[in-house]
Image (cartoon, rainbow, N blue to C red):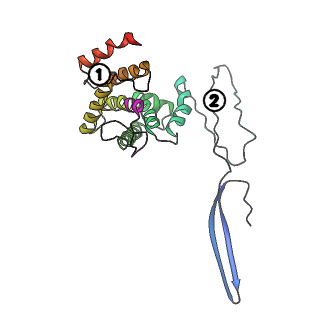
Amino acid sequence: SLESPSKPGVYDVILSAELGDYASKETVPLPVRLPQGLTSESGSGVVDAAVKKQVVAIPSDWQNGTIRGEIAFSASPVVTYGNALDYLIDYPYGCLEQTTSKSFPMLAVPRLAALAKNGKFDEQSLKTFINAGIQRLLTMQRHNGSFAMWPGGNSTYTWGSIFAAHFLTEAKHAGYDIPEDRMKALHNWLQDVVDDDDDDNDDHASVYARRCYAAFALSLAGKAGRSSVGAVRLDRPQI
């Protein structure tokens, strides 16, 4: 039996065997991890100019050798956004909605992201991050132009597809390269959503809301027709 060390890390396990005059020994590196996920804590505050000494509390009940800390100082309150961006960027899942949610803020506020990350997230890494998000979304696009929840999915996630369309349109305006045939298929699907006033199993307010959002996404792309947008507007009193 093996007894795990108290601290995480990579440890050498030495295996040896003897049989008569023959002996063999082998060293195998074995990674040791904690029996739980990583935990992070963050905080922010203001230091008065007259204060000469500021005490920062560090957790004392955590596993020895596992604590890693970082302190950032700035004259701008934007620095407090750094932890939120860390959480957003490092979020481990990649469905349609989560991929869009991770990429969209980086597109909207690249300077804010760079400032909040204290210079560690430069312009090129932001572009790489956004391009990776775009490519990830395109793996979820279906034959009808809409998007599935995950790559290779067979059913449309309607609200997520409109959200992704909104992001992709803004990304294209910002100069990111998105294949025209993909955008055309997406615009055609959005138009179908705008024109579809069949409530099916959804309440009218929900259907109307997604039609409005689809019309908004089309308008951003310059593809919204007056007649279809007008039809959506006429349906408003029915809510």
Image coordinates for residue 26, horizontal then vertical, percent: 63, 74
Relative to residue 170, is residue 91 depicted above or below? below
Per the model, the C-alpha gap separating discs 2 and 1 is: 41 Å
Q: Is residue 233 left or right of residue 202?
A: left
**Dominant secondary structure of the residues highlighted in magenta in the image:** loop
Which type of secondary structure does the marked residue at label 2 adopt? loop
Is residue 56 found inside the magenta-colored segment of the image?
Answer: no
Image coordinates for residue 117, horizontal then vertical, percent: 50, 34
Q: What residue type is labelled 1?
A: Ser
Q: Give the range drawn in magenta.
A: 149-163
Which type of secondary structure does the marked residue at label 1 adopt? helix
**Within the image, what quadrant is residue 139 found in?**
top left
Q: Closest to the observer: 58 or 201?
A: 201
Mark 1: few/some/many CA within 10 Å (<14, 14-19, 20+): some
Q: Which quadrant is the N terminus positioned in?
A: bottom right
Image coordinates for residue 67, horizontal then vertical, percent: 67, 44
Q: Closest to the observer: 40 or 238?
A: 238
Task: Give the residue at mark 2.
Answer: 43
- Disc number for residue 219: 1
Residue occupying image coordinates x 40% and y 27% = 108
Residue occupying image coordinates x 40% and y 26% = 200
Q: Which quadrant is the C terminus positioned in?
A: top left
Image coordinates for residue 204, horizontal then vertical, percent: 41, 19
